[in-house]
């Protein structure tokens, strides 16, 4: 008889003790259950058979030169025998009765214990040496739930800072096994960042991002691979000052400079239309860039755009919203009613393109201004017009400092409010 185990054929008769080779598989189960009662054996046979198969699969997986697979096979073999894998130092501290249970579960042949089972149940399996760079490779799969719903562009943005953190650590400290990372290694990494903050004018926030991303990778791998390591990752962050706010463009600057005839002629059409759409919607550049034709509703009684998680994640649940189109923003969206395919998957290049153009052509109000300042200008105009805070937050996609009641303002109401301040 042969059974299938993960695509491999495993002969039952090659794996059972010789004295049972001629016994039918079901009877073999009865004998292994130490019972002469057919009814009792039948009741227990299903779970026992599954346990045997799980044990055989784990043993097969152990026949590999890959250290990680061998260790995982030992963990699975321990589970197949009804135990959780523990390192040998922890097994040694178990109560005598639990320790004897583990020893008693190890099968023997010709009076000798099965060495793989002994290693799995008594914690003798050699733990794999996972380097920091290997930890990053494992992290992508172990943390894959964090990418659910993200677009390809969002996944790229999510991965890049984590790659950067690992590459920087490997450059400074080396590609050590994560089990060998010491407190001194982390302090060396922190000291390297401190030198850059002092001598190169980098912000503490940049250093903290590296520390956060590196810590997340190491802790995730440690937890999900059940390595049970004590990682020296605490008390390393730098104190950050107050974040510098992004300045809004003044209404006069937008009207007289940015909207001056011909001022934006050198900017490609999609980037230009997105800039103009931001002025009276306050939408984030990435939200506008990802709009599909179905989300641009020009035929509605109130022309509007719908910010939804279509092929991408929203920044937060509050970001889902409808925004009426008025003034120059309505004109811009009419010219691009199918959306912005050039930037749908590359909103970062959109911001870089627009910011470069505005600086080169003297259209930045100050050196600290960026494209994002148009979003802040939109909120400032609503504030000056006395628009209710609930409505402002709904339009901007911000959280409310209290529970939201009711549906909020209608599209018609929002259109009247925005129209009164539109440029």
Image (cartoon, helix red, strand yellow):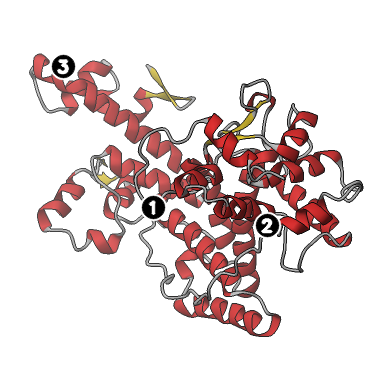
| Distance between mark 3 and mark 2 Cα atoms | 73 Å
Q: Can residue 75 be seen in this view?
A: yes
Q: Where is residue 405, by image quadrant?
A: top left
Q: Which of marks 3 and 2 is in front?
A: 2
Q: Where is residue 222, by image quadrant?
A: bottom left
| Distance between mark 1 and mark 2 Cα atoms | 23 Å
- Residue toward you, 179 or 281: 281
Tell me if label 3 and label 2 are in contact, CB under 8 Å: no
Q: Nearer the viewer, mark 3 or mark 1?
A: 1
Badge 2 density bin: few <14, some 14–19, many ≥20, Cα 10 Å: many
Left or right, 109 with reference to 227: left
Find residue 401 and name its label: 1
Does 233 sit above or below residue 272?
Answer: below
Question: As drawn, which residue projects farthest toward the left?
Answer: 37
Q: Name the residue under label 3.
A: 42
Tell me if label 1 and label 2 are in contact, CB under 8 Å: no
Find residue 373 and name its label: 2
Find residue 5 and name its label: none
Task: Please identify the quadrant where the C terminus is shown.
Answer: top right
Residue 221 horizontal/vertical position (percent): 46, 54
Q: Can residue 344 be seen in this view?
A: no
Does 102 sit above or below residue 366?
Answer: above
Left or right, 237 with reference to 283: left
Q: How many labels does the image show?
A: 3
Residue 406 horizontal/vertical position (percent): 37, 34
Task: Please identify the quadrant where the N terminus is shown.
Answer: top left
Q: Choose the circle earlier in sequence order: 3 or 1.
A: 3
Report helix, strand or loop for mark 3. helix
| Distance between mark 3 and mark 1 Cα atoms | 61 Å
Q: Choose the circle earlier in sequence order: 1 or 2.
A: 2
Residue 156 horizontal/vertical position (percent): 65, 47
């Amino acid at each position: 008889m042969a059974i299938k185990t993960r695509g491999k054929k495993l002969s039952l008769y090659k794996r059972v003790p010789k004295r049972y080779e001629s016994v039918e598989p079901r009877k073999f189960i009865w004998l292994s259950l130490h019972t002469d009662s057919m009814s009792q054996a039948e009741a227990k046979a299903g779970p026992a058979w599954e346990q045997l198969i799980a044990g055989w699969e784990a043993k097969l997986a152990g026949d590999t030169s890959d250290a990680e697979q061998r260790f995982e096979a030992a963990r699975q073999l321990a589970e197949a025998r009804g135990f959780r894998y523990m390192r040998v130092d922890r097994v040694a501290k178990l109560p005598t009765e639990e320790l004897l249970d583990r020893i008693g579960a190890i099968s023997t042949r010709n009076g000798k214990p099965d060495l793989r089972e002994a290693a799995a149940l008594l914690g003798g399996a050699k733990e794999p040496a996972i380097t920091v760079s290997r930890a990053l490779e494992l992290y992508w799969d172990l943390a894959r739930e964090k990418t659910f719903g993200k677009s390809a562009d969002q996944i790229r943005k999510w991965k890049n800072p984590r790659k950067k953190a690992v590459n920087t650590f490997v450059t400074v400290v080396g590609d050590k096994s994560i089990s060998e990372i010491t407190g001194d290694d982390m302090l060396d990494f922190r000291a390297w960042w401190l030198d850059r903050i002092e001598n190169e004018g980098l912000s503490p926030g940049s250093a903290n991002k590296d520390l956060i991303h590196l810590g997340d990778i190491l802790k995730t791998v440690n937890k999900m691979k059940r390595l049970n390591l004590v990682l020296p990752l605490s008390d390393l962050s730098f104190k950050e000052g107050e974040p510098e706010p992004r300045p809004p463009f003044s209404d006069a600057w937008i009207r007289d400079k940015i909207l001056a005839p011909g001022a934006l002629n050198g900017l490609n059409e999609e980037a230009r239309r997105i800039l103009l759409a931001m002025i009276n919607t306050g939408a984030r550049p990435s939200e506008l860039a990802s709009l599909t034709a179905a989300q641009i509703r020009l035929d509605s009684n109130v022309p509007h755009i719908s910010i939804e998680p279509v092929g991408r994640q929203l920044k937060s649940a509050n970001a889902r919203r409808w925004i009426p189109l008025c003034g120059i923003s309505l004109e811009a969206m009419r010219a691009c009613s199918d959306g912005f395919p050039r930037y749908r998957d590359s909103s970062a290049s959109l911001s870089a393109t627009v910011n470069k153009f505005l600086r080169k052509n003297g259209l930045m109000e100050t050196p600290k201004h960026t494209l994002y300042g148009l979003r802040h200008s939109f909120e400032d105009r609503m504030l000056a017009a006395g628009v209710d805070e609930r409505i402002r937050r709904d339009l901007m996609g911000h959280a409310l400092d209290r529970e939201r009641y009711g549906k909020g303002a209608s599209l018609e109401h929002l259109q009247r409010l925005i129209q009164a301040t539109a440029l």
